[in-house]
Amino acid sequence: MHKSYSRRSFLRSGVQIITGTYFASVLPIELLAEHRRRISAADAFRIAAIGINGMGWADLQSMLKHPNARVVALCDVDENVLNRRKAELQKANIEVDTYVDYERVLDRKDIDAVIIATPDHWHCKIMVDACSAGKHVYCEKPVGRTIAECRVMEAAQRRYQRVVQVGQWQRSMQHFQDAVDFVQSGKLGRIRLVKAWNYSGSQVPVQPDAPAPAGVHYEKWLGPAPERPFNPNRFHYNFRWFYDYAGGLMTDWGVHLIDYAMLAMPASPIGGPASPAGGLDYYPKKITAIGGKYGFPSDAEQWPDTLTALFDYQDFAIQWEHARGINLGPFERDHGIAYIGENGTLVLDRGGWEVIPEQTNHQQKMEPVARQHAVDNGLDKHTYNFVEAALANQPDQVHAPITAGTRVAEVCHMGNIAWLTGEVLHWDSQSGQFQEQHANRWITPEYHHGIAFPQV
């Protein structure tokens, strides 16, 4: 493991010569491979990716832009994906070992860090095992499928003191931080409501159960989840629409956007580069949600395709809404956050932010702010930040620490639980439970197939 790190190898690398700036659009793997040959083996930061189909592949390509990063192993329970990714790396003369069992990856002493980009129901178990094995971790969001999983993941990072970065990469984008600074400047006046939303996606047509494709180790894919027949809808990308594995759009997009809804509010306790720790309780006092399968009542998705959730923080509220199959959301944006103040509203999305003034008697209550456009690549900056923090062995240097991931995931899970119960729920921060005891059944998951719930 790297105990300390100087920037000498980065300065020698000349990576800025390639693109004019380090954080540019995705470079061809061949170009990255050629450039990294300038780094000595002693300075190499050795990475393994666990789950390499979607975001795992994107995360790995981005992380390899760091001049010290080397991928040495891939792991996936779908050998078709595994072989395809290995072949793509071989085109750049990058040789890797491949595994279907993540435990074999963690057994290797020469691996410094792992990317965890499996379906959500595997995140907790693998992350805890990885920290225990001494690996630094870049974990895709949402960190845990349940509130209890979030808690044990946080405990694992504290106990083992590994560098853990959550894949909430908007925390590394400059314009998001600039928007937070503006909100916290007070110019918007008192903020009583923050809206966050995502309007995207389409229906998931019903498909019959079928044998798992050749090369798919389905029993390993299920892992701690309940026994179910293989169904194409539950596999790869679409897993996120089913209770057993994920939390629908609320936890898929909600963790990105509700994160910033909470982060910008005064004295946010969530931490990160845009706000110090300490201050208000990050948990809402009351939670309610309404919605259902209004758009596609007969498709395969289990979570609602249309949902509105309200989180009451006593002196302000956060509202989440989503509608799959509709692309035109509030303020004519398919996703975003709106901080609605008494003087004006700041609207923020991945492309930029602007301020729309309130008016009284045709007089604007503040100066408008024209659209401030995004200027950087959030994913590239995020993975670079992770590698730098891991090389320095400094957990507090990451932009999205484990607490950033757990706090927002827990709040999103609360919204889903409110929808499942159909009630107004009251959260007790002291006990870490709902006052409505029957709602607490969703806090801790039941693990299956001989896998024990992780203990730290």
Image (cartoon, helix red, strand yellow):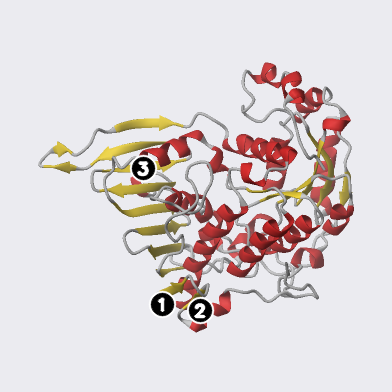
Residue 333, quarter of the rendered image: top left
Specify few, some or many for label 3: CA neighbours under 10 Å numbering under 14, 14-19, or 20 or more. many
Specify few, some or many for label 2: CA neighbours under 10 Å numbering under 14, 14-19, or 20 or more. some
In depth, the one of 424 and 328 nearer the eye is 424
Tag 2 residue: 439
How far, Cα to Cα, is label 3 from label 1? 32 Å
Q: Residue at x 59, y 63 (%)?
A: 241
Q: Residue at x 60, y 57 (%)?
A: 142
Instruction: Evaluate whether residue 367 shows in this view.
Output: yes
57 w.r.t. 449: above or below: above
The secondary structure type at the circle numbered 1 is loop
The tally of labels here is 3
Q: Are marks 2 and 1 in contact (CB under 8 Å)?
A: yes
Instruction: Evaluate whether residue 198 shows in this view.
Output: no
In depth, the one of 117 and 264 nearer the eye is 264
Nearer the observer, disc 3 or disc 1? 3
Q: Are marks 3 and 1 in contact (CB under 8 Å)?
A: no
20 relative position to 292: left or right: right
Q: Residue at x 56, y 56 (%)?
A: 252
Q: Amino acid at mark 1?
A: Glu
Tag 3 residue: 183
First along the sequence among labels 3 and 1: 3
51 relative position to 24: left or right: right
179 relative position to 163: left or right: left
Tag 1 residue: 423
The secondary structure type at the circle numbered 2 is helix
